[in-house]
Amino acid sequence: MAEWQSGYAADCKSVNAGSIPTSASRKKMNILLTGCAGFIGYHLAKGLLRNNKVYGLDNLNDYYEVKLKKDRLLELQKLDNFSFFNADIKNTISCYEDINFDFAINLAAQAGVRLSFDSNHRYLDSNIIGFHNFMDYCVKKNISKVVIASSSSVYGNSCLSPFKESEKNLIPASIYASTKLYNENVSKIYAEKYEISLAALRFFTVYGSFGRPDMAYYSFCKDLYLQREFTVFNEGKMSRDMTHIDDIVSGVENVINYVKKFNFYNFEIFNLGNANPISTLDLVNKLEILTGKKALFNFQESLSESSITHADLNKSGNFLKYAPKISIEEGLKEFHDWFVGYHDI
């Protein structure tokens, strides 16, 4: 089996792509997108570039393989109307000063719930300080339409399943989740004070091609092919509402259309999930079938993991007409086909 790498290789530098003349029938929006080299950011940028200009921002950090982020960025740089600026939002944002933005989307964050104690400062740097810098930038640039990424992890170990956006007294089970709940609360204050129309999106376990290697489905697939023992938490009895990236992109595009309607303060929280949780053991079984390999388990306990995530999609369906279409079998096959090609198996 080949080494775990792709055929792409290039250093990422600030690139400003040429623009396509604006159609008389449709005005392209200028959209600021932080975290554009991340998993969701990459796919969202591709979707938005069909009808808009995307100005990306990312620091290409080393939380997981930088090469994967560069490969995503290389794909985006092949497209018209995409610009990239290498910067870290934990520092004051000072870029694209000559651009008037119609929309801003913040996906930049320190992800993951299991950082080591010595790395916990990353949550503060990106998810707290960086988030404030993003919101301050929106105020400075008079960007009145904003979308921010939250997470299903804000529900913690809620016993009210499926999870509704209206649920009160949330108690997150990790530092990461706490920062996301903080972001929701702070963004509401910004929105009201500066008359911003803003939507916070609680993503539920997003998966698919060009995904994050730290996510369970990705690492399971890799370990199956390597026939390496892999860690499964809490006896594999946890369930996750796994949502394919194509459904997430479709949902975010619907959110953008919703937010565009308001020319005054408006704040909403939306779940974007699949509403069909799958257990860890069932997930592994489906990956065993796709890979033709048998899993080698190392069972461990984890207090930072929620026992289940399950999105209630009534609000998203009513407000956004959001309706996920991709089954777990179809989505995992799409991911597996990409995985095999990317890693040259």
Image (spheres, grey):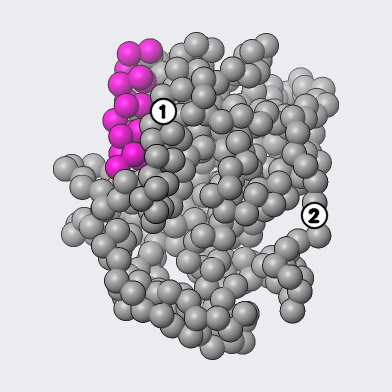
Residue 5: percent from left, percent from top: 73, 63
* Mark 2 and mark 1: Cα distance apart in space: 33 Å
Q: Nearer the viewer, residue 141 or 23?
A: 141
Residue 251: percent from left, percent from top: 50, 45
Tell me where the magenta segment starts and ends, as one range.
178-194
At x 29%, y 58%, the residue is 304
Q: Residue furthest front?
A: 118
Residue 248: percent from left, percent from top: 52, 49
Residue 189 occupies quadrant: top left
The residue type indicated by label 2 comes to: Tyr
Q: Nearer the viewer, residue 286 or 233?
A: 233
Residue 1 in the figure: left or right of residue 168: right
Q: Which residue is mark 2?
A: 8
The image shows residue 232, relative to residue 106, as above or below, that is below
**Upstream in sequence: badge 2 or badge 1:** 2
At x 38%, y 13%, the residue is 194
Residue 217: percent from left, percent from top: 51, 68
